[in-house]
Amino acid sequence: MKSALRILLIVVAVVVSLVAAGTFVPRPLFAPETSDAVAQTRRVLVLSNPIHTDIAIPLDEETRADYAFLGASGIPVADPAAEWLVIGWGGRAFYLETPTWGELKPMPVFRALTIDQSVMHVDVAGSIDETHSAIRFFDLQPVEFRNLSDFIQASFVRDGGEVVVIPGAGYGAYDQFFEAHGRFNAFLGCNTWTARALRSAGIRTGWWNPLPQTLGMSLDLFN
């Protein structure tokens, strides 16, 4: 009994140490050099809930054209009322089968804690209150924004050049799920994907951020 308790305590200590290191050790380790050039920036948002993060990019003339490929699947990127394109990556079973907490089931949770296929979830939004405590914003230079957009678009699986829609899997009238590259698990999940996307744009994160809370803390610390 004492031996089992000792092992459990060691495991807990290791996990806590990894989470702490993942939060407080920056990635990249040293801040990249910043350009003094004056350019028009674009603001992007990181939207958080207790277990998941999404990235919201502004819908303007250029981004509506860049993401016009989503229109054929029912995402109204051309609608003037749509101000933001909200994109996230996650585990297929949990994402598709848990539209609300009230519909939580054991199997999607099990798949999320082990290994699952991944999907992209895309939605649109109107005005977003950027002062909300669950939202962080970053103003990106053109090259930084392009790198972020390239990372996001590369996450979609394409067949014959077209993104692959998952039929009938959306939560509402204007969102949709798509096949995505990569495997989802509890250690490399939706929030680590968000962190990778942000790092592609020159935003520093923690070394390993499996939770929205640790990602948010590292974003505040290093940016």
Image (cartoon, rainbow, N blue to C red):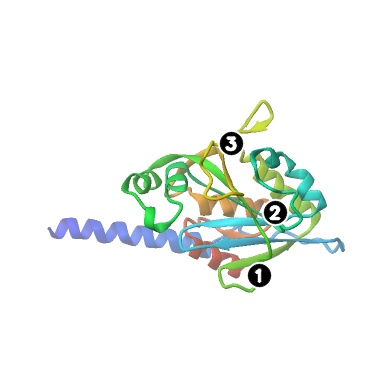
Question: Of the residues tagged 1 and 2, which is closer to the observer?
Answer: 1
Q: Is mark 3 on a helix, strand or loop?
A: loop
Given the image, on which type of amino acid does mark 2 rest?
Ala
Residue 189 appears left or right of 113: right
Q: Mark 1 points at which residue?
A: 130
* Residue 219 in which image quadrant: bottom right
Which of the two residues, 102 or 203, is positioned nearer the viewer here? 102
Mark nearer the N terminus (3 vs 1): 1
Residue lying at 79% horizontally and 55% vertically, measured from the top left: 60
Residue lying at 53% horizontally and 45% vertically, measured from the top left: 170
Residue lying at 52% horizontally and 39% vertically, measured from the top left: 168
Say which mark, if any, is on residue 202.
none
Q: Do the residues labelled 3 and 1 touch (CB within 8 Å)?
A: no
Q: Name the residue under label 3.
A: 165
Which of the two residues, 192 or 60, is positioned nearer the viewer here? 60
Q: Do the residues labelled 3 and 2 touch (CB within 8 Å)?
A: no
Given the image, on which type of amino acid does mark 1 rest?
Glu
Q: Residues within 10 Å of mark 3 (few under 14, many from 20)?
A: many
Given the image, on which type of amino acid does mark 3 rest?
Val
Q: Where is residue 167 in the image (x, y as percent from the top left)?
A: 54, 36
- Mark-to-mark CA distance, 1 and 2: 20 Å
Residue lying at 63% horizontally and 60% vertically, measured from the top left: 204
* Residue 157 in which image quadrant: top right
Q: Mark 2 points at which residue?
A: 201
Q: Position of residue 131 (x, y in %)?
A: 64, 74
Residue 116 appears left or right of 39: left
